[in-house]
Image: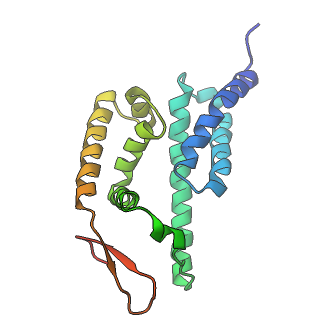
Amino acid sequence: MTAGPDQVFDEVFRALYPEVLRFVQRRADSDVAEDLASEVFTIAWDRWSRVPREVRPWLFGVARNVLAEDRRVQGRRYRLELRIGAEREPVGDEYALSTTALDLRLAWARLSDADRETLALVAWDGLTGREAAKVLGCTRAAFSVRLSRARRRLQRLLGEVDVLPEPSPTSSSPRFVIEGTQP
């Protein structure tokens, strides 16, 4: 007797939910990661009859789309907070980061979304080049080129990052400027 779609989905969910959750946790706030991972599987359930044979890369692609939508929502919320004057105060521990970690964070922030995603699929999610290419919807060769270029850009940005404390006339906490950018 063959397994029905419900049973197959249940097996896929049990096997891949932890991986999808880790994928989302590395890209979203921890307080919403489980909700976003659940949304990925809700979408998978709704489209189960049309899910490709290789489910894992497809799920990561769905997760990317769910995360992108979450980022858009968060961006709108943040811009609204700024407009109504609810600026966020810097967390004290952020100033205690090591120089290396701070340099990496600044360089990472200056990368394009596409470069960050390309690097993260391999470094954080452990996908093969073939799997990552499927997630991004491109060929294996195109992914290899993207990965190589993203690595070079990150290395170049790491060499350019120079954090200079700059006093702010209205604040007692230091403001940081990345050399070569406008404050």
Q: Extreme bottom residue here? A: 169
Point out the image quarter for the N terminus.
top right
The reply, left or right, for residue 75 in relation to residue 138 is right
Give residue 63's quadrant in the image: top right
Give residue 164's quadrant in the image: bottom left
Q: Position of residue 119 (x, y in %)?
A: 38, 43
Q: Nearer the viewer, residue 153 or 81?
A: 153
Residue at the (36%, 86%) spot, across then down: 167
Residue at the (56%, 85%) spot, across then down: 84
Q: Position of residue 178 (x, y in %)?
A: 29, 70
Residue at the (46%, 33%) spot, across then down: 126
Q: Is residue 122 visible?
A: yes
Residue at the (68%, 50%) spot, across then down: 35
Q: Position of residue 150 (x, y in %)?
A: 29, 45
Instruction: Relative to 132, say whether 174 is above or below.
Output: below
Q: Is residue 47 visible?
A: no
Point out the image quarter for the C terminus.
bottom left
The reply, left or right, for residue 168 in relation to residue 10 is left
Q: Extreme top residue here? A: 1
